[in-house]
Image (tube, helix red, strand yellow):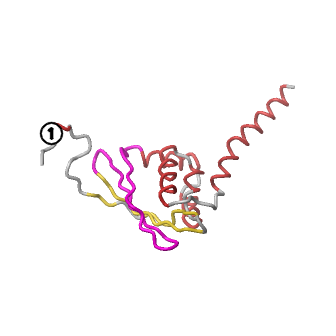
Amino acid sequence: MKKGFRVALIVAITIGVLGPAAWYASRQNGYPSPQDCLDAYAEARKAGNVPMFLGCLAPPLRQRMNTQFPDADAFAESLRGSMKDVKSWVQLDAVVDGATATVDVDEVLASGTRRIRFHLERTGQNWLISKIEAPKDVPGTIPFGTDVTKVPAD
């Protein structure tokens, strides 16, 4: 009886872990809007959810990321680390041109703000990230965390 229980437990755990992972990784549907896709992307990074993260990417970019990070645990840690210092994630308006879209996102950190440009593609009615440009620093007038009493009045 004990051996049967252990086998059943192992099968249940395997299905519980690999089932959602396979579902996210195999998602070809994408998201109904560029904003929804980027919301899921940010959430996946914060949580270190590799399958969800990969589900936000178009196939060529997904393959490149899988090649770059073959170890799932290291990949998850890298995702979490990439959001560790992010205080705020702000999407600017999407520029949609047919089946492509460009969205700038400002990541606010204690050290400043950086803007990342995302390129998305639509297949049918669904959106996936096809390219991510390198972050660029955005000049800020008031550093993050500045006491409100220290902000000059206009």
Residue shown at 29%/58% (left/top)? 137
Q: Nearer the viewer, residue 14 or 57?
A: 57
Is disc 1 placed on a helix, strand or loop? helix
Residue 116 in percent (x, y) is at 38, 60
Write down the region rendered in magenta.
Answer: 84-112
Secondary structure character of the magenta stretch overall: strand
In which quadrant will I find the N terminus? top right
Q: Nearer the viewer, residue 20 or 111?
A: 20
* Residue 136 painted magenta: no
Q: How many marks?
A: 1
* 15 lies above or below 9: below
Kindly identify which residue carries mark 1.
150
Residue kind at label 1, given as amino acid type = Lys
Residue shown at 23%/53% (left/top)? 140
Residue 33 in percent (x, y) is at 52, 60
Residue shown at 42%/47% (left/top)? 83
* 33 lies above or below 152: below
Based on the displayed image, in which of its 4 quarters is residue 102 positioned?
bottom left
Residue shown at 12%/44% (left/top)? 152
Report the side of 4 relative to 41 (left or right). right
Residue 25 in percent (x, y) is at 63, 55
Q: Residue furthest bottom?
A: 98
Q: Which of 77 and 119 is in front in this view?
A: 119
Q: Residue furthest top?
A: 2
Report the side of 147 relative to 1 (left or right). left
Instruction: Determine crowd level at label 1: few under 14, some 14-19, many 20+ residues with C-alpha closer than 10 A.
Output: few
* Residue 97 painted magenta: yes
Residue 115 in percent (x, y) is at 34, 58
* 149 lies above or below 117: above
